[in-house]
Amino acid sequence: MKIRAKTGSETGDIEAGTNKFGPYQMASQEQKTIEEHFQPAFVLEKPPCEASPFIFSSPHSGQIYPAAFLQSSKLTPTQLRSSEDAYVNELFAHVVDQGAHFIHALVPRAYLDLNRHPHELDPKLFASTLPDFAMRDSIKVKSGLGVIARIVSEGQEIYTNKLDFDDAQTRINSLYFPYHKALRDLIAGAQTSHRHAILIDCHSMPSGNLPGFQDIPPDFVLGNLFDKSCDYELTHLLRAQLQSMGYHVSVNKPYAGGYVTKEYGRPQNGVHVLQIEINRRLYLNEQSLAKTNDFEELRSNLQILTKKLINSLPELSFGTSLAAE
């Protein structure tokens, strides 16, 4: 079952006290763009049978680029898409039939990054002074990759002119908070039904210029914040299964986990979050962004991987101990 979630005028909180944006007027051109193109803002797919505690998410696979956004950018659509986790939602679509929930964004990363703190705002991007709560000095903001990115992944500036803060506020309130509210609700629902939740946050990574890899870059990078966001057994199971398929797997290098991993991973409270990065050369022509002939093989292998993962839950000690409580 697919639920195409609607945007709305109500704001949400990541956790109590973090949403400081407040109400806004819905008559702006930015809001009209959102209402025209992002109704819905994301898709939530529910399994046809009783759900497992597994949730899969893809916050960067959105492919809708509004005309107004394209006109505001100095980049071509293909250049803007270089930040996109192209087709990751398709690579993991099968998890719904395996008993997992799957939430994936329709909003593109170049327009709004759902894997950032909502206050990571880049002062270089805006015409006006930012409010005091803006996290101007975060590493991501300094690199130009805040919640509203200033650059694409290849370092090219996105916008022709600086933005109004009100437009940023509108994007975040209308699109960011509803996505994270849905994600929190899924986690809470899994905890209610199973006493724990397991979130796999799915991404892709460029094949070149990976920090720390001068020779052959890994096929997959698993990020668990150095065993802080999930039980180590979960990471070990995925790594062992991928290696048995012949893939080169790295753990926490160069990606230990993004905002979703850090924000929601609380294994001591029964919430396990693992980030998975897939090397784009396994399935994508990175210049044209067309699927290669290897796409179906990768998708088939991921289907085997996730089935093994979901079916192995009773073997994981954290699952067994919680189930016995």
Image: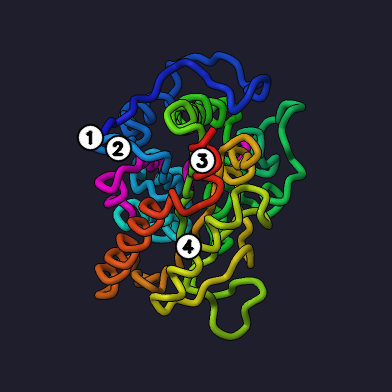
If you read the primary sequence from the N terminus, does the residue marked by circle 3 or circle 1 appear first?
1
Give the residue at mark 1.
1
Horizontal and vertical percent position of residue 133? 74, 28
Please state which of the two labelled residues, at mark 2 or mark 3, is closer to the viewer: 2
Q: Secondary structure at mark 2?
A: strand
Q: Is any part of residue 132 visible from this angle?
A: yes
Give the residue at mark 4.
238
Residue at left 47%, top 43%? Answer: 111
If you read the primary sequence from the N terminus, does the residue marked by circle 4 or circle 2 appear first?
2
Give the residue at mark 2.
45
Instruction: Give yes or no for contact between labels 3 and 1 (Cβ–Cβ under 8 Å).
Output: no
| Left or right, residue 256 beside residue 196 | right
Amino acid type of the residue tagged 1 in the rendering: Met
In the image, 230 versus 11, the foreground residue is 230
Please state which of the two labelled residues, at mark 3 or mark 1, is closer to the viewer: 1
Horizontal and vertical percent position of residue 295? 28, 69
Quarter of the picture containing the N terminus is top left
Q: Is any part of residue 171 visible from this angle?
A: no
Instruction: Give yes or no for contact between labels 2 and 1 (Cβ–Cβ under 8 Å).
Output: yes
Q: Does the magenta stretch mainly form a helix, a strand or a loop?
A: loop
Indicate yes or no whether the magenta region holds residue 167.
no
| Left or right, residue 28 beside residue 17 | left
Please state which of the two labelled residues, at mark 4 or mark 2, is closer to the viewer: 4
Residue at left 42%, top 43%? Answer: 54
